[in-house]
Amino acid sequence: MKKAIFLLSVTLVAVWGCQAPDCDRPDCGTCGNACCSLSFHFDGMTSEAAYNKIMMGLKNGGADGRYRYIGGDDLRPYNISASFILQGVHTTLVHHYNDTLNFVLTDDMKPSIHPLGTTLRAFSISQIAGAYCDDGQNYKNLVGFVKGLNMKYMETTVAGCPKPT
């Protein structure tokens, strides 16, 4: 019986798990559930331009057509460190799982107050309870979306989804 359950779970991961490429960064419970937090830096772009591009990317379904825009807001009137915030959802290839995506944008400034670029902090978390390991899906959600924006970036891991050793 245990062997049958193990084989079933392996089969389900193969069928419903992350579809390559970019599935090499699995997370097992960093956030109490599978998650990934990355930071992307875009040189020479304002947070407003990045916000518009990200919002339209979500509204248009992203590179794979399975991203959805939930909402966003301009935080600049509140005089806080963040400029814009957005939320979206990504549905996996087999349309079985949804993952919540959160984005916050900040302008990187020189002392002379000229923009150097924008930093996007991006977070993806599995929506199902008990998604202890995600087969790399949360990393793929973020990096796949940003790659689809066709903007040059530098990526840094903040939490979860560790780089392969």
Image (spheres, rainbow, N blue to C red):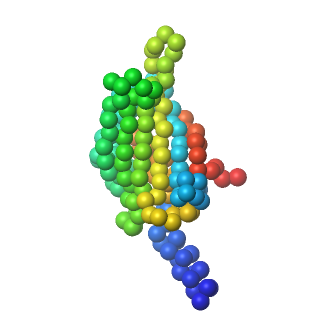
Locate residue 69 relative to residue 158 in the image: left or right: left
Locate residue 116 relative to residue 94 in the image: left or right: right
Q: Quadrant of residue 64?
A: bottom left
Q: From the viewer's perspective, is residue 78 above or below residue 40? A: above
| Residue 133 in the image, given as x and y percentages of width and height | 56, 63
The residue sitting at the top extreme is: 112
| Residue 141 in the image, given as x and y percentages of width and height | 46, 52
Q: From the viewer's perspective, is residue 63 above or below residue 96? A: above
| Residue 49 in the image, given as x and y percentages of width and height | 35, 29
- Which residue corresponds to the image point at 51% horizontal and 36% vertical from the top-left? 40
Q: Which residue is at the front of the view, 53 or 73?
A: 73
Q: Quadrant of residue 105?
A: top left
Locate residue 75 relative to residue 20 in the image: left or right: left
Residue 58 seen in the figure: yes
- Which residue corresponds to the image point at 42% horizontal and 49% vertical from the top-left? 101
Q: How many marks?
A: 0
| Residue 126 in the image, given as x and y percentages of width and height | 46, 58
- Which residue corresponds to the image point at 66% horizontal and 53% vertical from the top-left? 164
Residue 140 seen in the figure: no
Rendered-image quadrant of the N terminus: bottom right
- Which residue corresponds to the image point at 44% horizontal and 63% vertical from the top-left? 128
Q: Which residue is at the front of the view, 129 or 149?
A: 129
Locate residue 59 relative to residue 50 in the image: left or right: left
The residue sitting at the right extreme is: 165
